[in-house]
Amino acid sequence: MTKSESSILSLIDVMARLRDPETGCPWDREQTFDTIAPYTIEEAYEVADAIASGDRTALKDELGDLLFQVVYYAQMSREEGGFDFDAIATHEAEKMIRRHPHVFGDPDISDAAAQTRAWESHKAAERAEKAKTKGPESVLDGVAMALPALIRAEKLTKRAACVGFDWPSIDEVFDKIDEELAEAREEVENDAPRARMEDEIGDLLFAVANLARKLGIDPETALRGTNDKFTRRFHHIEAELRARGKTPAQSDLAEMDALWNEAKEKENGRA
């Protein structure tokens, strides 16, 4: 037995003991697939945060927490008489081999773009195979509802684009953004019901997510970067106001805007 195999078995055993009906942890015994799902999403974001911060020690810890989520689901399923961790790992290995014939078989794929096309082709073939037993499936099936809205928008439009439902050029996406922005402005200026304004804002964000996809940019990553930038610059405002014996509430927009521009200039290397 390899060290990796021993480590996995140890983790699986820990999970089994936590779920033991008599001697396990009361909290862990009460959990279900539904109650654990939000923690899985949270752990995935913590992995992303550790990567963004460049903290490899934190990344190791967060990846362990994420792996534990998989072991948790496997244990709950095993208790029901369903799949276990071995079945999950075996199925995933088989799927990866099937989707990478250029590595494990004969086809020659020269670059990442060609691999992406081949990957989507394999996934489409798998969906078609499932349809034989489960009935017709949509091209959009499998894009998880629980994904953050921007990520889901990018994935939905990517799926549609694979079957030709896409704007031919970037210019048309910009035109769509202009159109949606004008419609949102019109609803606001006409004091439309909140539901209509929400609908138009959603259309605008969807169009922007489409632009990101066309440019090969992950919209969620882009927005996270902007959130971080906003946080840094606002922290600068707070620090400078603190040095003046003030808080943001004791300042005004003109002063804070000047400090914002100062932070912006420093980040851009002009100060």
Image (cartoon, rainbow, N blue to C red):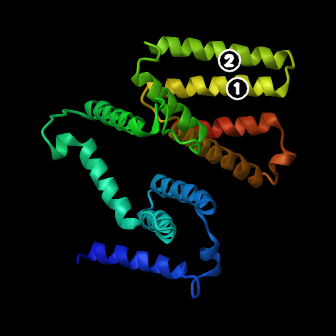
Above or below 157: residue 65: below
Q: Secondary structure at mark 1?
A: helix
**The C terminus is located in which quarter?**
top right
Mark 1: give few (<14), some (14-19) or many (20+) Cα within 10 Å: some
Amino acid type at mark 2? Leu
**How many badges with numbers are in the image?**
2
| Residue 264, label in figure | none
Q: Position of residue 197 (x, y in %)?
A: 78, 24
Viewer-proximal residue, 25 or 197?
Answer: 25
Residue at 54% of width from left, 80% of height from top?
18
Amino acid type at mark 1? Ile
Relative placement, left or right, of 174 versus 132 is right
Residue designated by label 2: 181
Above or below 15: residue 150: above
Viewer-proximal residue, 210 or 139?
Answer: 139
Residue at 70% of width from left, 26% of height from top?
201
Q: Which-is-in-front pick, marks 2 and 1?
A: 1
Residue 22 picture quarter? bottom right
Marks 2 and 1, how far apart at CA: 8 Å
Q: Position of residue 187 (x, y in %)?
A: 79, 17
Residue 192 picture quarter? top right
Viewer-proximal residue, 34 or 252?
Answer: 34
Relative placement, left or right, of 20 versus 90 is right
Viewer-proximal residue, 210 or 143?
Answer: 143
Earlier along the polypeptide chain: callout 2 or callout 1?
A: 2
Residue at 55% of width from left, 28% of height from top?
209
Residue designated by label 1: 201
Above or below 43: residue 162: above
Residue at 36% of width from left, 73% of height from top?
8
Residue 242 picture quarter? bottom right
